[in-house]
Image (cartoon, grey):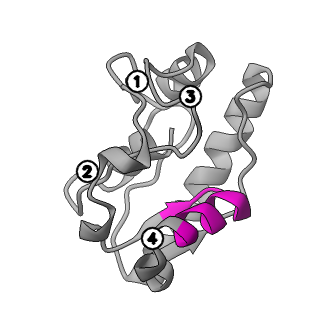
Amino acid sequence: MAKGLAQKMFPSEFYVDSAGIDSETSGGANFRAISVMGEYGVDLMSHLVKSITDVAISDFDHVIAMDSNLFDSVIKAYPEMRDRTIQWQIDDPFYHPVGTYRSCAEEIVQNMKVLADRLGLSQLECNSTGQMA
């Protein structure tokens, strides 16, 4: 969801990718995530889940860890990324109802707005109706 929202909010600003660290790193996006992202005008139907080991993490300017456990895992595996890894605290909605996915999406949007301000990036507003302002 974060990748799709970032691409929608910052369509030409930078390259965005998504990867996980747990064993569920194959297949497509969760049907609840697909549904909620559709509300934002983001299409996840072709999204394929992948592992962090499948991306060249050291090539990224910033890595966003969605919670402290992910942050710790990234830093343990890639200690050189400590200064470029940003920790958020957004609970994984995976085993929860669709409303939790909506809350998670809103948290991601709010965190991205803060990050954009911190990095001096212009952003498009993104809301759950999929409209950009």
Mark 2 neighbour class, 10 Å CA radius: few under 14, some 14 to 19, many 20 or more: some
N-terminal of the pair, mark 3 or mark 2, is 2
In terms of image quadrants, where is residue 12? bottom left
Quarter residue 26 falls in: top left
Residue 124 x/y as whole percent: 38, 56
The one nearer the camera, 44 or 78, is 78
Q: Which residue is mark 1?
A: 44
Q: Are marks 3 and 4 in contact (CB under 8 Å)?
A: no
Q: How much space separates mark 3 and mark 4, taking CA atoms?
A: 20 Å
Label 1: state its secondary structure. Answer: loop
Q: Which residues are magenta?
A: 64-76
Residue under the point 37% across and 23% down: 43
Amino acid type assigned to the residue bearing label 4 in the image: Tyr
**x 53%, y 30%: residue:** 129
Q: Is tag 1's residue or tag 4's residue first in the polypeptide sequence? A: 1
Mark in the foreground, 3 or 2 = 3
Amino acid type, mark 1? Leu
Q: Which residue is the site of mark 4? A: 78
Asked if 38 appears above or below 115 in the picture, the reply is above
Front residue of this view, candidates 70 and 92? 70
The crowding category of the residue bearing disc 3, from other C-alpha atoms within 10 Å (few below 14, some 14 to 19, many at least 20), is few
Label of residue 123 in the image: none
Question: Could you say whether the residue bearing mark 2 is in a helix, strand or loop?
Answer: loop
2 or 1: tag closer to the N-terminus? 2
Secondary element at image label 3: loop
Q: As shown in the figure, which amino acid type bears the numbered disc 2?
A: Pro
Type of amino acid at the residue the image marks with label 3: Glu
**Residue on which the image places disc 3:** 24
Task: Please give the name of the residue rendered at 23% of the width and 56% of the height, measured from the top-left corner.
Answer: 15
For label 2, the residue is 11
CB contact under 8 Å: marks 3 and 2: no
